[in-house]
C-alpha cells in the first residue's frame, strides 16, 4: 500500500466483488488467536487506506451481493470481527473519524458511548439488524443480537413504538376471534348458500362473515409477503417458530370454506371448525409481548417440533403395522344368528326368526376386520382405554393376545415413558436457550411492526440522534445511538487515573486536593495559625 514505485489498488476486487476487507471477513473463524490477528490487520489496512486515500471510504464498499464488510460479517456469523467493527474506537485525532464508537463522557466505571448506526439500523434497506434477525442460517445470531448497540437498539424500538402497536394488534385480534366464534356458532343448518335475512340477526351474521373474509385475505397476503422475505425452512421453524405458517393455514381453511359455502357444499363446516380451532391457537402468538409467557410458548414450540414429531413418527409406524397384522389375522366364526332360516316366511315362528335376524344385522357391532376400527381400538390401548370383552368369538386368540401385549409394551410402556424422559430433558435444555429464542422472536416482531409503518412515521420514530462529531460544523454528521455502559474491569485497572469531569473526555487528571479560587488565601491563614496549634498540641495530652 505504501510502495512509492508500484502501489496496490486498495479497491481491487475479485469476481464476486469482494475487496481486501471482505477477504479478511471470510478468513475469520471466531477463535481468539485468529480474531486478534484479523482485527489488527483490518485496522491497519483501514488506517493506511484513510491516510493514503482520504476520499475512499473503504469500509462502505459493497460486493455483488450488496454486502459491506460489516454486513458480510453479520451474515456469516463472524461474531468476533463483527463485534470489533461495531465497537471500534480510535483515540488519535487524525484517524478518529474511522471510529464507529465515540465516548461522550466517562465517570468512574460508567461510560456513555455514541454508536454509529450507519448500516446497522433497520431504518435502512438490507441493514445489519435485518440480516441477523431474518437470517435463520446464521449459527450464533442469538449472541450477535446481545452485543451493543443492537441489544439496546431493539429495546428502544420496543419501548418507543412497537409495544403499543403490538398491544393494539392483540386487542383487534381478540375482537376478530370473538366475532368469528359467534358467527361460526350461530351458523344456519342445512344446505348453503343461505339467503340474506333482512333482520338484525341476519345483518349481524352477514357482517361477521364479511369481517372473517377480510381478515383471512389479510392473513393470507401477509403470510405470502413473510414467506418471500424469509422462506420457511426446517431451521427457521425450529428457531423462529411457526406462527406465520399457522396464520397461513388459518387463512387457507377459511378461504376454501367460503368457496365450498358459495358452491353449496355442506363440507364447508369441516374447514370452518378447523379454522376456528387454529384461530384460538394463534392467540398464543401474542405471548411474545410478555417474558414469562413468551418463554413458555417457546418451550411448547420446541417440544412440538422435536420430541413430539419423533414420537409420532415411531408411534404411527407401530400403530399401522400392528393394525394391519390384527386385521389380517382376525376372521369371524360363522354364527347361527347370521345364517338365514329355510322355513317359509308364512310360518309365524319363521317370521319372528326373520325379524330377529334383520334386527341383529341392523345392529351389527364393528369388529377387528375393519381397519379404521382396529386402528382406533389400538390407539385406545395406548392411552389405557382398551377393552378385550369382544374377543371371545375370534379364532387364533393366542396370536392375537401376543400381538396386543407386544403392542402395549412397545407403545404404552416404552414409547410414552421415553417421550416423558425426552421432554423433561428438552425442558432442561431449552430453559437455558428459551430466553434468547424469545428475544429473537421479539426482535422479529419489532422489525415486522416497523415495516408496517408508513415512511413518515418510521422517520419520526427512528431511534438515535444526529450528532456532529467533527470540529468543523457539518463535516462529519452521523446518526448515532447513545448507550450507557458499566465496565468494572476497566474501572479496576484505571483507579490511578480517574477522570472526575464527565465533560472532559480527552484529558485525564490525577486525583489530588481540591483547589478552589481562594486556595492561596486559605493556605496563608492556615500558616498563621500553625504556631498556636503547635502550642495547644504541647499542652493537650490527647490531641485530636
Image (tube, rainbow, N blue to C red):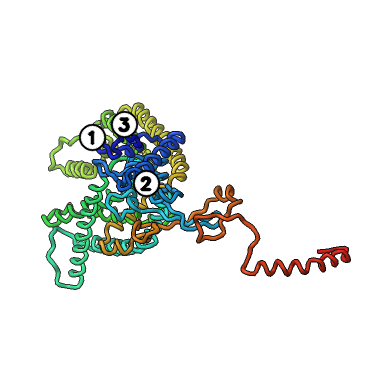
**Viewer-nearest of discs 2 and 1:** 1
Where in the figure is residue 506, as x and y percent of width and height? 49, 55
Tell me which label, 2 or 1, sits earlier in the chain: 1
Where in the figure is residue 95, as x and y percent of width and height? 40, 48
| Quarter assignment of residue 394 | top left
Seen from the viewer's position, the closer of residues 175 and 141 is 141
**Pointer 1 residue:** 15
In the rendering, which numbered label is found on residue 301? 2
Between marks 1 and 3, how big is the CA–CA gap?
Answer: 59 Å
Residue at 57% over, 51% down: 491
**Pointer 3 residue:** 322
| Secondary structure beneath label 1 | loop
Residue at 21% over, 53% down: 220
Tell me which label, 1 or 3, sits earlier in the chain: 1
Is residue 295 visible from the viewing direction of this image?
A: no
Tell me which label, 3 or 2, sits earlier in the chain: 2
Amino acid at each position: 500500500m505504501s510502495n512509492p514505485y508500484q502501489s496496490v489498488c486498495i479497491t481491487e476486487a475479485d469476481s464476486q466483488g469482494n475487496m481486501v476487507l471482505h477477504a479478511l471477513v471470510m478468513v475469520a473463524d471466531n477463535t481468539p488467536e485468529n480474531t486478534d490477528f484479523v482485527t489488527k490487520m483490518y485496522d491497519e489496512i483501514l488506517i493506511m487506506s484513510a491516510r493514503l486515500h482520504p476520499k475512499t471510504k473503504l469500509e462502505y464498499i459493497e460486493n455483488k451481493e450488496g454486502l459491506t464488510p460489516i454486513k458480510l460479517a453479520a451474515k456469516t456469523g463472524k461474531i468476533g470481527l463483527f463485534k470489533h467493527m461495531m465497537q471500534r474506537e480510535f483515540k488519535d485525532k487524525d484517524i478518529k473519524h474511522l471510529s464507529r464508537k465515540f465516548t461522550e463522557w466517562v465517570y468512574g466505571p460508567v461510560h456513555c458511548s455514541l454508536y454509529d448506526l450507519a448500516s446497522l439500523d433497520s431504518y435502512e434497506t438490507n441493514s445489519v439488524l435485518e440480516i441477523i434477525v431474518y437470517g435463520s442460517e446464521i449459527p450464533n445470531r442469538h449472541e450477535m443480537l446481545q452485543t451493543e448497540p443492537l441489544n439496546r437498539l431493539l429495546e428502544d424500538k420496543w419501548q418507543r413504538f412497537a409495544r403499543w402497536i403490538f398491544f393494539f394488534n392483540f386487542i383487534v385480534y381478540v375482537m376478530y376471534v370473538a366475532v368469528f366464534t359467534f358467527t361460526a356458532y350461530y351458523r344456519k343448518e342445512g344446505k348453503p348458500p343461505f339467503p340474506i335475512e333482512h333482520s338484525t340477526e341476519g345483518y349481524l351474521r352477514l357482517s361477521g362473515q364479511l369481517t372473517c373474509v377480510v381478515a383471512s385475505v389479510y392473513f393470507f397476503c401477509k403470510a405470502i409477503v413473510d414467506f418471500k422475505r424469509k422462506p420457511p425452512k426446517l431451521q427457521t421453524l425450529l428457531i423462529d417458530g411457526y406462527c406465520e405458517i399457522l396464520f397461513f393455514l388459518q387463512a387457507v381453511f377459511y378461504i376454501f370454506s367460503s368457496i365450498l359455502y358459495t358452491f353449496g357444499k355442506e363440507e364447508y363446516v369441516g374447514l370452518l371448525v378447523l379454522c376456528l380451532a387454529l384461530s384460538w391457537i394463534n392467540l398464543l402468538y401474542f405471548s411474545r409481548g410478555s417474558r414469562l409467557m413468551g418463554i413458555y410458548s417457546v418451550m411448547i414450540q420446541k417440544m412440538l417440533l422435536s420430541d413430539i414429531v419423533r414420537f409420532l413418527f415411531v408411534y404411527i409406524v407401530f400403530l399401522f403395522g400392528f393394525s394391519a397384522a390384527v386385521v389380517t389375522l382376525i376372521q369371524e366364526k360363522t354364527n347361527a344368528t347370521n345364517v338365514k332360516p329355510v322355513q317359509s316366511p308364512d310360518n309365524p315362528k319363521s317370521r319372528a326368526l326373520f325379524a330377529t335376524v334383520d334386527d341383529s344385522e341392523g345392529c351389527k357391532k364393528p369388529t377387528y376386520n375393519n381397519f379404521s376400527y382396529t386402528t382406533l381400538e389400538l390407539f385406545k390401548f395406548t392411552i389405557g382405554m382398551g377393552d378385550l370383552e369382544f374377543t371371545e368369538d375370534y379364532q387364533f386368540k393366542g396370536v392375537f393376545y401376543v400381538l396386543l401385549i407386544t403392542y402395549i409394551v412397545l407403545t404404552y410402556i416404552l414409547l410414552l415413558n421415553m417421550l416423558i424422559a425426552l421432554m423433561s430433558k428438552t425442558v432442561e435444555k431449552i430453559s437455558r436457550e428459551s430466553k434468547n429464542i424469545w428475544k429473537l422472536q421479539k426482535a422479529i416482531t419489532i422489525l415486522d411492526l416497523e415495516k408496517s409503518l408508513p415512511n413518515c412515521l418510521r422517520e419520526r420514530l427512528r431511534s438515535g440522534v444526529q450528532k456532529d462529531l467533527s470540529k468543523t460544523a457539518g463535516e462529519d454528521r452521523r446518526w448515532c445511538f447513545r448507550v450507557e455502559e458499566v465496565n468494572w474491569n476497566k474501572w479496576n485497572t484505571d483507579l490511578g487515573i480517574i477522570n472526575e469531569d464527565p465533560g472532559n473526555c480527552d484529558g485525564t487528571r490525577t486525583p489530588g486536593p481540591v483547589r478552589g479560587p481562594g486556595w492561596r488565601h486559605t493556605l496563608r491563614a492556615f500558616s498563621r495559625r500553625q504556631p498556636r496549634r503547635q502550642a495547644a498540641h504541647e499542652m493537650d495530652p490527647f490531641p485530636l
